[in-house]
């Protein structure tokens, strides 16, 4: 029984060490945003950096919010929602621009969610414009629900 317990402890130690060694560093994920051509790698990096709230990634994600690939823009905007502060005018402006102008309704929806999460007053005028011009029913519904929530406070 002691041999099995000892073996299990040693095995768990090596598995933990292997998983830790396999995880990339913050710098490597940021480098993936800039250097990788693989969409899956970029998306994984954006998701990880947003989840870990790595503020250094904001500049890189802002660039990707205007990428040609829809999935890259989507994940960049979602990550920005976790990283951008109300005071970061440049990044808020990018999120606002995406809300108004992106060709993809999914990306615009993600930008609306990110805008809600950031909560910048600099987005109020953009919200009004989106409310007037948006054709996607899901985005319109999201805006209506959020407005109701704000009025209820």
Image (cartoon, rainbow, N blue to C red):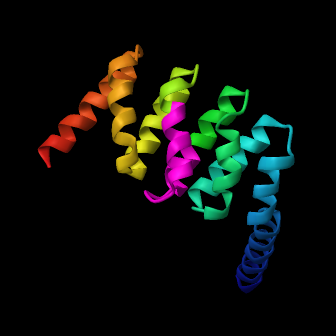
Asked if residue 44 is positioned above or below residue 68 in the image, the reply reads below
- Camera-side residue: 143 or 121? 121
Q: Position of residue 70 (x, y in %)?
A: 66, 27
Q: Residue furthest left?
A: 152
Q: Position of residue 80 (x, y in %)?
A: 56, 49
Asked if residue 152 is positioned above or below residue 39 in the image, the reply reads below
- Camera-side residue: 34 or 9? 34
- Camera-side residue: 20 or 109? 109
The N terminus lies in which quarter of the figure? bottom right
Q: Residue at x 70, y 80 (%)?
A: 5
Q: Residue at x 57, y 21 (%)?
A: 104
- Camera-side residue: 122 or 29? 122
In the drawing, does residue 1 fall left or right of residue 125? right
Q: Residue at x 33, y 40 (%)?
A: 124
Asked if residue 141 is positioned above or below residue 1 in the image, the reply reads above
In the drawing, does residue 145 fall left or right of residue 80? left
């Amino acid at each position: 029984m002691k041999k099995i317990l000892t073996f299990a402890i040693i095995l768990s130690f090596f598995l933990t060490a292997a998983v830790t060694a396999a995880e990339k560093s913050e710098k490597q994920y940021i480098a993936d945003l800039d250097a990788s051509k693989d969409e899956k790698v970029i998306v994984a990096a954006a998701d990880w950096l947003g989840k870990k709230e790595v503020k250094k990634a904001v500049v890189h994600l802002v660039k990707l919010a205007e990428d040609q690939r829809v999935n890259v823009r989507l994940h960049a905007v979602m990550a920005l929602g976790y990283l951008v502060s109300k005071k970061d005018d440049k990044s808020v402006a990018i999120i606002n621009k995406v809300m108004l102008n992106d060709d993809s309704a999914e990306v615009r929806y993600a930008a609306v969610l990110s805008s809600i999460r950031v909560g910048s007053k600099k987005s109020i005028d953009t919200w009004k414009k989106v409310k007037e011009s948006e054709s996607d029913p899901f985005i319109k519904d999201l805006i209506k629900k959020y407005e109701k929530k704000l009025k209820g406070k």
